[in-house]
Amino acid sequence: MENIDPRKVSLPRPCAFLEAAHDPQDPNPWQTLWLDRSVPIHPDVKQAWLRDSNTASRQFLLPFVRPLARLTIVLLQLIKTIIPNSLTSSRLLHRLLAWALSVFATPEANWLILRHFWIGSENLAFLNANIKGGGVEMNPLKPQDLPDLVDDLFIKHDLNLFNFITRLNLKLREQGIADIAPNTELDFSMISDDGHFPIAPQNNGWFNKIDLQTCIDIFTPVYQLFLTDSDFWRSVHSLQLDETIGLYTAKVLKRSEGLILINNKHPMVVPATWSAGYRLVLHGLSSEMLHALLVEEKRKKV
């Protein structure tokens, strides 16, 4: 029999509070969100997200971490203006993030982070295969565990978004194609409709208590510190491309229902860097909702 490390858990884990009896005098906000079906999202992801949100760190630590993190980002921005490329090391950054996540983040947070690379790769692959005149070079990212992040995966994820949109539009321009249009037949073969990816069980030790949103706010100034000023600004800009990807998908699927949630505001108006942590959370959920919509469309074709 295979030995299973008792300190590791597979996701998603059951959430008793989501299935508890409804109390009209004291309704549970997370249970209400769980029962509501207006938002397109995989049920396992929704369950993991709500469990991760219903933590002490999310309730009591995040309100203190977020303003301090934003202040740190502003101060670092001033420092980076003077010495933009000092103390930078993408390799060290990714090693630090992988270690810190394995030690301090909840299993749900780590599972959602690893899953994000898989669905992001599938979302872009769908557009690449189905936009008329498309078919550009891609670099899918499919990490199975946190050590895989060490290979500069966060930077590569940002580069993938910019390179896909740039290469696609250069190719369309070369062909004289003025706008995004779908192929006659849509290909959904790259979309994993069961939503299950080969992600390893995640640590559930004594210190794995920090929720995803708090982790992101803590790590954003660390991310800024170890990256060049150019790399960090590009990372911030990449969050605005959610709207662009949503518009492309709407034109390919010829539908807008549900895609309104896939946005990070106008792609040409980039907010200040201090809000990057919050918008990174929106980016993660936007990607999940886009993938859920693609799964929905795939199942209609069956």
Image (tube, grey):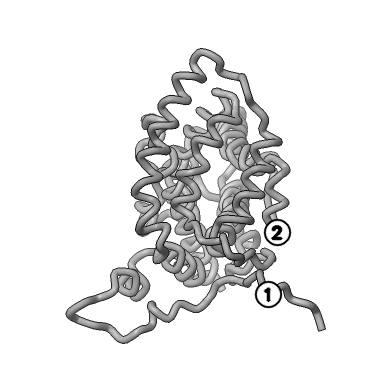
Residue drawn at x 38%, y 43% is: 66
Dot 2 or dot 1, earlier in sequence:
1
Asked if residue 229 lies left or right of residue 256, the reply is right
Q: Which mark is residue 6?
A: 1
Quadrant in the picture for the C terminus: bottom right
Residue linked to disc 2: 144
256 versus 20 height, above or below: above
Closest to the camera, between mark 2 and mark 1, is: 1
Total marks placed:
2
Toward the top, the furthest residue is 82
Toward the right, the furthest residue is 1
Q: Disc 2 on helix, strand or loop?
A: loop
- As shown in the figure, which amino acid type bears the numbered disc 1? Pro
The answer to whether residue 135 is seen in the rendering is: no
- As shown in the figure, which amino acid type bears the numbered disc 2? Gln
Residue drawn at x 38%, y 82% is: 19
Residue 247: x %, y % from top left? 43, 45
The answer to whether residue 14 is seen in the rendering is: yes
